[in-house]
Amino acid sequence: MVRILLVCSAGMSTSILIRAVEKEAVARGQQVSVRAVGTTELESAVGDADVVLVAPQVRHRFPQFAEIARAAGKPIALIEPKAYGPFGGPAILDQVAQLLSGS
Amino acid sequence: MLHRPILSKRGETGMMERLLAWVERTLMPPMAKLGEQRHIRAVRDGVVATLPLVIVGSFFLLIAFPPVPAWAKAMEPHVAKILIPFRLTVGLMALYASFGMAFSLARSYGMDGLTSGILGMGAFILTTLPQNIAQLADGSPGPGWVLPFANWGGQGLFTAMLVSLLSVEIARFLYSRKLMFRMPEGVPPAVARSFEALIPGSVVVTLVWLVRGLLNFDIQSAIMNLFKPLVVASDSLAGALIPILLVTLLWSAGIHGVSVVGPVARPIWYALFEANAAAAAAGQPLPHIVPEQFFQWFVWIGGSGMTLSLVLLMVFSRSDYLRKLGRASLLPGIANINEPIIFGTPIVMNPVLAIPFILAPMAAGTVTYFAMKVGLVGRPFIAPPWTLPGPIGAYLATGGDWRAAALNLFNVFLGVLIYWPFFRAYERRLEAEAEAKNRTA
């Protein structure tokens, strides 16, 4: 089971992404759990995640998030703008696989 | 036909591309940096944390003054009682925020949040002089010592901001100079922390008391007067249009505009909002037009850039991709969530769609400003949660003015008209691309 944590401004828009990722995971036969949080909740939620993905609209805060993720020893990356939407499931799961194999 | 030249005339598209490049390279970095500045971040966190209380509290205004005259009549004898939650939430906004701001700033320095938050809140409370009311006007015994909280609402946010953040800075300075009581090993950390805070606490308390109590300098009035010109200037057409321009420019470069502009502007928006709410509670005409609810319910319909209008066009698009994306984004759009549209369409760095993305909200902001200015539509004084559908939110925000719901729908329609030619141009380009792909495949 791969636990994915998505970060956006208020945790609202990424909740749309959750469904896209879960659907793709079912199609691929993978076990994932996806959680969306707002920027202020990252610090308390990062411990329960295997990988952190950051929404493109808060990319100006990425350095700050990267620091939190690094402190927790979790891989972190930015979501490609094009993958950020209801059809972004495949691209995001590919990105997760890449992040986990890289660490 | 407006849409053809935009694609064929090189010059116009080129200019828009240059503008977007300028936003990304020149405008965005300093703005993003400002939004990340730790004091501004602390203000943002502290103010945002009060939002649930403000939303709930402001709804008691609606209960006290319902839009239906018959109900309003029935409520009349109970208004004072119904307004108690409103007075103790919205009316104490600055008090709650003073804790949150100091908490957040302390955490960003790696200091203890709880003791710092309480220190900041204490510093803010000390800017108010308690009064001993032993006897009421009618001769009956009074409540004794009371704290007047007239300046603890939105107008007091500036005082809360300066005083609570300053108290954290003082504590940090003292810690950095090793000016604190150190407890021996083995003392429970919670006890040790409270002793560590003794010296900063005594410095902050003494300082605020010296200025307010001993020198009798009215800190609250001074700070409110200092910020008054800013608040007044924000309640104008320029005050409406400048934030709209900045937010849409930042979003067209892919940055969450409201999360950058909001932290700086929100204390002012709250001050305007609280003044309106207080006027409504007192049964007076509402003084201000441009609290945050102005943007939320009349400009950012469907999300920043008024993208609900674009989504409505996409739902019926000839392009398979746009139609699919539009249908998937319709429900989120009604709840004012639009990231899938902004990144999926995309609007980000898209020189064609960035134009209406900026123009439509500017037009809606202008129309709404004047509609409220001349009294065609009521002004906002209630804070509904931002994920409500636009017309409902507009109706509630204005205390139940159906004309506000109509204006919301009118603005969506206006947005459709403004998006239309640009949308068609973009749709044709996608169609042409899809066709070219089919031919080569």
Image (cartoon, coloured by chain):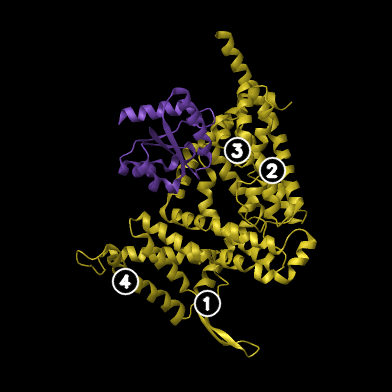
Q: Quadrant of residue B424?
A: top right
The chain assigned the colour yellow in the figure is: B
Q: Camera-side residue: B290 or B310?
A: B310
Residue marked by disc 3: B332
Residue B51: where, in percent of width, then height? Answer: 54, 56
Any part of residue B238 in sight: no
Residue marked by disc 2: B363
Q: Are marks 4 and 2 in contact (CB under 8 Å)?
A: no
Q: Amino acid at mark 1?
A: Leu
Q: Quadrant of residue B113?
A: bottom left
Q: Are marks 4 and 3 in contact (CB under 8 Å)?
A: no
Residue marked by disc 1: B147
Numbered label attached to residue B198: 4
Q: Is residue B251 above or below residue A88?
A: below
Q: What chain letter is assigned to the residue under label 3?
A: B
Q: Which badge, 4 or 3, is on the more N-terminal residue?
A: 4
User: Which quarter shows the N terminus of chain B?
Assistant: top right
Q: Nearer the viewer, mark 3 or mark 2?
A: 3
Q: Amino acid at mark 2?
A: Ala
Q: Amino acid at mark 3?
A: Pro
Mark 3 and mark 1: span between their CA atoms?
45 Å
Q: Residue at image x 39%, y 30%?
A: A96
Q: Residues within 10 Å of mark 4 (few under 14, many from 20)?
A: some
Q: Which badge, 3 or 2, is on the more N-terminal residue?
A: 3
Mark 4 and mark 2: span between their CA atoms?
55 Å
